[in-house]
Amino acid sequence: MNNHKDEIKKGYDLHSNGQLQEAESIYKNVLHVNKENIEVQYLLGLVKYELGKLHEAYDLIKKVCKKNNSNSDYLYNLSLISLKLEKKKEALTLAQRVISLAPNNSLYYKLYAECLQRLGRYQEAIDTYKDYEKIAKHVPEEIILNQGLLLTDIKKYIEAESKFKNILKINPDSIDAVLGIAKINLLKKKYTRAVELLNKLSNKHKDNKKIEIMRANAYFQSGDLNNALSIITEILKKNKNDLAILNNIGYILREMENYSEAKEYFKKIIKLDPKHINANVNLGLILLSEKSYKEGWKHYQFRNSQESVKNNTPKTNSQKWNNKTLHNKKVLVWTEQGLGDEILQASLVNDLRDFVDELTVLCSERLLTVFERSFPNVNFFSKNNPAISSMNFQDHLSCPLLDTAIFLRSHESKFSNLNNYLLPDKNKKEILRNRYLNLIPNQPNKPIVIGISWRSENEKYGIQNTIKLENWYPFFNVIKNMKRNIVLLSTQYKCCEEELEYVYKHFGIEIYLDKEIEYSNDLDSPISQIASCDYIISTSTTTAQIAGALGKKIWHLPSNGISCGWYWLHKGDKTPWYPQMTHIRRKGNNISAQLKKLSEEISRHFKNKELII
């Protein structure tokens, strides 16, 4: 027995000195003789953890915890390892147990906060850090920084900046605190201030990769793509084959519309790491925008491994589709991303329904009414319906609806019969149609109703896909020169009356706003309104997608670069997704030229119909 104590002490000393493999060997020898020694099992588990053998460490320490579930150190380390292994819920439960056993140990609150943070429960994590501060005698910079980052993530920018400034009072040289403040400025779209902060930081800390990446991002977001590319290319010289940097370069080249060179960067990354998620997704998006559908879908399918996508995947007991046949199977699919994207994805439903035995689709609540009417032989449920998780889909194969495009839209020739797949409420449509025609009564010819949307509410790309009404003068001039009476109708979500008053005051054009159309709930009324129009003109908004799905004649004003959706393609005036849509392309950031071209197109269209003076 004394020999075992000596051996254990020797192993412990080696362990403490960082001689992990030697310590591992001694602990194993002791356990070979005394298999039930809990303390040595625990120490071996810790060594395994430090050696990066996480699964072995987890098995050992879990075994120890089963024998003694009241030792806070054991449970703490099991929670730590569980978190490393992405067993987030188990790690959280263990961390809660540890705090209940030792409520005055601040270290345990730190772990609990980290578990909450990893699960996306940011406010709870912030509250837990506050509990940590109440207990700890000294609050390290790391804790204050984590709070600042979490507050930034939940858009509490004033509180977040206060945390970063508190760090700078203690440590004026804190790089992370300045980066935190710069990030807040970027999120608030104060690009000049962010660039200024990052340039100062760059001058102090030459060649700091973290600083330079954010500095490049700041220039990128400010629209200075040449500077962004120059900075990130310089970083690459010192970090050759750094996959994140290569991906950033490809991303900037995508925004610069240098697609051929961007593809080469993404292909280089994939050659080095075939499962690189972002490179595959980015390459897929370019290929899809070039109509290289077969290859494009294969790469774009990697988006399913992105955290944001995984977190929004419906929880069901269905079987995951393995890209093999769906023929004569029961299938469960779901729509993704924004409402406009869901409408585009719905173009796959009829083809998929003909292919499978039974089809169930999960979509946004606001689209249920129109989808159920448009696709009567399909089962629809809201993605937010809490009952979904308890429904029995065991005999269903499941995947995102868009993934079925792998075989349904593998070539441009497979885009057929896509007109009018969305069906409006006929009665609502006729009521609205008559309402708008009667805005100009007692005329020999009925007026032409043109719906117009100009602003995107997309959080990420809304600015790029918005053209303020004050810039639409060339279009308004065409309307003024029409022989036929025109009803210009706002089909804009969250239309601001002040905008319309400005147009009337400065251009003498009245845009009619129907206040009875409700956009924030069910989309059935807006869809009926768009269906009642003769023509639609829109930037990249949900209006454009609805009009395309209804088969309406629409002039579409897409942005360019990354903010131009892959389904709009990156050249040409047509997209196979919406045959009646005509793109009016933007070159660079020249919105004036885009609107001038729109005006020429509309003038030519109506002149052919002898409706222009």
Image (cartoon, grey):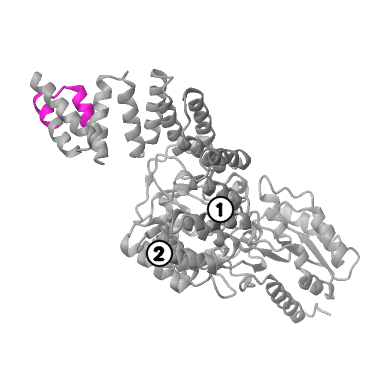
Q: Residue 221 in the image: x percent, y percent?
A: 57, 59
Q: Which is nearer the eye, 513 or 387?
A: 513
Badge 1: residue crowd in 10 Å (few <14, some 14–19, many ≥20): some
- Between disc 1 and disc 2, the foreground one is 2
Q: Does the magenta stretch include residue 269?
A: no
Identify residue type, mark 2: Leu
User: Is residue 135 visible in this depiction of the protein?
Assistant: yes
Badge 2: residue crowd in 10 Å (few <14, some 14–19, many ≥20): some
Q: Residue 471 in the image: x percent, y percent?
A: 75, 67
218 displayed left or right of 431: left
Q: Residue furthest right?
A: 442
Q: Which is nearer the eye, 52 or 426?
A: 52
Identify residue type, mark 1: Phe
> Residue shown at 17%/34% (left/top)?
23
Q: State whether residue 82 is above or below residue 267.
A: above
> Residue shown at 40%/33% (left/top)?
89
Question: What residue would you read off at disc 1?
Answer: 375
1 displayed left or right of 246: left
Quadrant of image for the N terminus:
top left
- Mark earlier in primary sequence (1, 2): 2
Q: Quadrant of residue 277?
A: bottom left
Q: Does the magenta stretch include residue 34?
A: yes
User: What residue range appears in magenta?
Assistant: 28-44
Q: Residue 197 in the image: x percent, y percent?
A: 57, 54
Q: Which is nearer the eye, 5 or 442?
A: 5
The answer to whether mark 1 and mark 2 are in CB contact below 8 A is: no
Q: Which is nearer the eye, 547 or 179?
A: 179
Q: Main secondary structure of the magenta part?
A: helix
223 displayed left or right of 294: right
- Looking at the rendered structure, which numbered label has been put on residue 236? 2
257 displayed left or right of 597: left
